[in-house]
């Protein structure tokens, strides 16, 4: 099946905007097509899940994410580490649109909204762990810049099928509870560009055994 020019252009525009929001100004580099892609491996849920607690609990519920350590072990380990050491405490959902909600930038904790989306943790970047899993609704991916191996702390949740993201961003989990909260965040107004004017903050992310998640 041929992709119509208008559809193809929309996908490229979406991907270019995504890279720009991760702190880079250009489109994806050509290396994305040559990166190793893990194929034919079904995701296996990690024994632990991540529970995102929102600062404004009266307005927003929890978001629970199952983690795929068999698909992206390095990114899952990084996510768990940053959740446990408090890096994610107080970060905002700094990028909100009809495609994704994105968070995980330590710089979003400060009072300068202009640097939101450009920061990362003090730990080294995480190499790409691309797979042939599809970016369907609720997939959790690792945000990065133009370099395939520049994922670090930022992550995003897809709000619908995003074909343009396939094979281009590390998938390391999926929302199993609280997708309604993600959708609620995606519709918040007013915004400056893609950043909510009134910060929507994550209070904390708990890593707990799957059976203990509420």
Image (cartoon, helix red, strand yellow):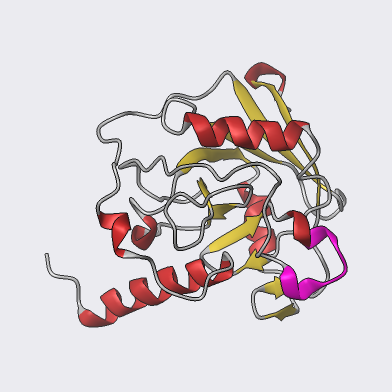
* Corner quadrant of residue 131: top left
Seen from the viewer's position, the closer of residues 153 and 163 is: 153
Residue 74 in picture, x, y percent from top left: 51, 32
The C terminus is located in which quarter?
Answer: top right
Residue 112 in picture, x, y percent from top left: 83, 72
The N terminus is located in which quarter?
Answer: bottom left
Seen from the viewer's position, the closer of residues 199 and 119 is: 119
At horizontal 35% and vertical 47% (from top left) the residue drawn is 134
Q: Main secondary structure of the magenta part?
A: helix
Regarding residue 56, the answer to whether it shows in the image is yes
Q: Is residue 177 above or below residue 7?
A: above
Q: Is residue 98 left or right of residue 80?
A: left
Seen from the viewer's position, the closer of residues 167 and 124 is: 124
Looking at the image, the residue that sits furthest to the left is 1
Q: Is residue 146 above or below residue 4?
A: above
Q: Is residue 41 left or right of residue 165?
A: left
Residue 20 in picture, x, y percent from top left: 53, 72
At horizontal 47% and vertical 51% (from top left) the residue drawn is 137
At horizontal 77% and vertical 60% (from top left) the residue drawn is 107
Residue 87 belongs to the span the image colors magenta: no
Count every numbered label the image shows and give the total. 0
Residue 183 in picture, x, y percent from top left: 62, 58
The magenta-colored residue range is 108-115
Regarding residue 196, the answer to whether it shows in the image is no
Q: Is residue 137 left or right of residue 134?
A: right
* Corner quadrant of residue 10: bottom left
Residue 113 belongs to the span the image colors magenta: yes
At horizontal 25% and vertical 32% (from top left) the residue drawn is 40
Q: Is residue 191 above or below residue 56?
A: below
């Amino acid at each position: 099946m041929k992709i119509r020019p208008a559809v193809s252009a929309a996908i490229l525009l979406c991907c270019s905007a995504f890279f720009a929001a991760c702190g880079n100004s250009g489109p994806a580099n050509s290396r994305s097509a040559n990166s190793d892609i893990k194929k034919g491996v079904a995701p296996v849920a990690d024994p632990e899940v991540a529970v995102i607690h929102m600062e404004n609990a009266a307005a927003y519920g929890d978001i629970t994410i199952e983690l795929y350590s068999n698909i992206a072990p390095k990114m899952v380990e990084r996510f768990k580490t940053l959740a446990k050491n408090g890096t994610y405490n107080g970060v905002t959902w700094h990028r909100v649109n009809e495609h994704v909600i994105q968070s995980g930038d330590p710089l979003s904790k400060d009072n300068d909204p202009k640097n939101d989306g450009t920061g990362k943790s003090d730990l080294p970047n995480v190499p790409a762990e691309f797979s042939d899993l599809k970016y369907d609704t609720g997939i959790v991916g690792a945000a990065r810049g133009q370099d395939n191996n520049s994922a670090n702390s930022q992550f995003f949740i897809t709000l619908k099928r995003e074909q343009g993201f396939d094979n281009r961003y590390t998938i390391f989990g999926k929302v199993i509870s609280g997708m309604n909260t993600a959708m609620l965040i995606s519709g918040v107004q007013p915004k400056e560009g893609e950043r909510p004017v009134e910060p929507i903050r994550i209070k904390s992310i708990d890593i707990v055994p799957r059976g203990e998640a509420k």
